[in-house]
Amino acid sequence: MNIRLLSAAICLTGIAVAQTSASLQTSGNEREDANVHTSAKHDVGSGAGDIGKGAAKGAGSAAKGAGKGAVDLATLHPINAATDLGVGAAKTGKNVGVGTVKGTGKILKGAGKAIKHVL
């Protein structure tokens, strides 16, 4: 009984020590990642990715609003159906707009870096 208790205590102590040292190591890496400079290619690529993510989120919001509206219309709740369609359209516009602006900003930043590098 005492051997089991002792082995369990040693295992738990080892796990606790391993977790605290891992958290100290990740905090150091976060500081290094904050100072990493990205290349022009990376900025342009991540900008295009942001535009795609915004479009995908917008399509998802539109589908969600249309689906909820169809269900409300089928259950004879036309006011809720109109509300759900309006909310879906608004969220679609927001998501597409945010993705486009963020992506365009990153692409322009990358283009500026590329021009600066050439000159």
Image (cartoon, rainbow, N blue to C red):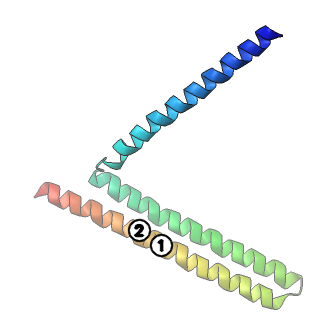
Q: Which residue is mark 1?
A: 98
Q: Residue at x 57, y 31 (%)?
A: 19
Query: Where does the image place residue 82, in percent across and percent down from the top left?
Result: 74, 88
Residue 41 screen position, x and y as percent: 30, 53
Residue 35 at what x, y percent from top left?
30, 48
Q: Relative to 41, is 78 above or below? A: below
Q: Residue furthest left?
A: 119
> Which residue matches tag 2?
102
**Considering the numbered disc 2 on the image, is that residue within a helix, a strand or a loop?**
helix
Mark identifier at residue 78: none
> Toward the viewer: 30 or 113?
30
The picture quadrant where one finds residue 33 is: top left
Image quadrant in which you'd find residue 67: bottom right
For this view, does 111 lie left or right of residue 1? left
At 79% across and 86% down in the image, what residue appears? 80
Q: Are marks 2 and 1 in contact (CB under 8 Å)?
A: yes
Q: Residue at x 30, y 50 (%)?
A: 38
**Would you call the spot at circle 1 few (<14 residues within 10 Å), some (14-19), or many (20 or more)?**
some
Return the x and y of residue 72 as percentages of the image width and height: 83, 82
- The type of residue carrying mark 1 is Val
Quarter of the image with the N terminus in it? top right
* Type of amino acid under label 2: Lys
Q: Which of the image's four quarters has the C terminus? A: bottom left
Q: Secondary structure at mark 1?
A: helix
